[in-house]
Amino acid sequence: MGPENRVQRLSIHRPWRAAAAIAAAGGALVLLMPAVVRPYQAEAQFSAALRAELRGDLAAALPLLEDAQRLAPENPVYAVEAANLMLRTGRIDQARKAFKSAIERGSEDAAAYRSLAVIDQLTGHRAEAIWAAKKGFQLDRFSRASQELLSQTTAQ
């Protein structure tokens, strides 16, 4: 085989390699696209939920918050807001679960810990109430609310 045939054979294989590389990159993009888009979709749902809540339409806000949590389960902010909304609508057990979910997702919101402590106190979960009050205090030592709740919880 002469040098001419070799050059001709290489040039035939190059377009196929380029096409394969483009196809692989496209496949990777298809796989990564949901991971890139979901946080933006979650934020849009969260914003819609906040607007509904500001309008006083709490019934519309909760499903939007649940969608935001489904789209970005790693974001504890959505779970905290859902818990606050559940608390406002008197769904104490659901609020407790949502606050715990937010904490499991890594929330460092002292108010979420304080709310959980109050719910735990009201529902007879004293040890959990003390733990949540201590954690809320650790996250916000200079908050009068955190100080008073810790004193109240540990004094009982």
Image (cartoon, rainbow, N blue to C red):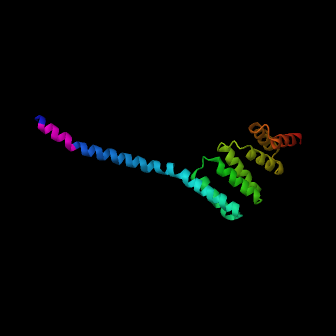
- Residue 11 painted magenta: yes
Q: Nearer the viewer, residue 145 or 23?
A: 145
**Residue ID at (77%, 42%):** 132
Segment colored magenta: 4-12
**Residue ID at (60%, 57%):** 45
Chief SS of the magenta region: helix
Quarter assignment of residue 145 = top right
**Residue ID at (71%, 44%):** 109
Q: Quadrant of the N terminus?
A: top left
Q: Is residue 135 visible?
A: yes
- Image position, residue 108 (x, y; %): 69, 41
Report the side of 61 relative to 71 (left or right).
right
Quarter assignment of residue 49 = bottom right
- Image position, residue 82 (x, y; %): 69, 54
Q: Is residue 91 visible?
A: no
Q: Is residue 65 above or below residue 134?
A: below
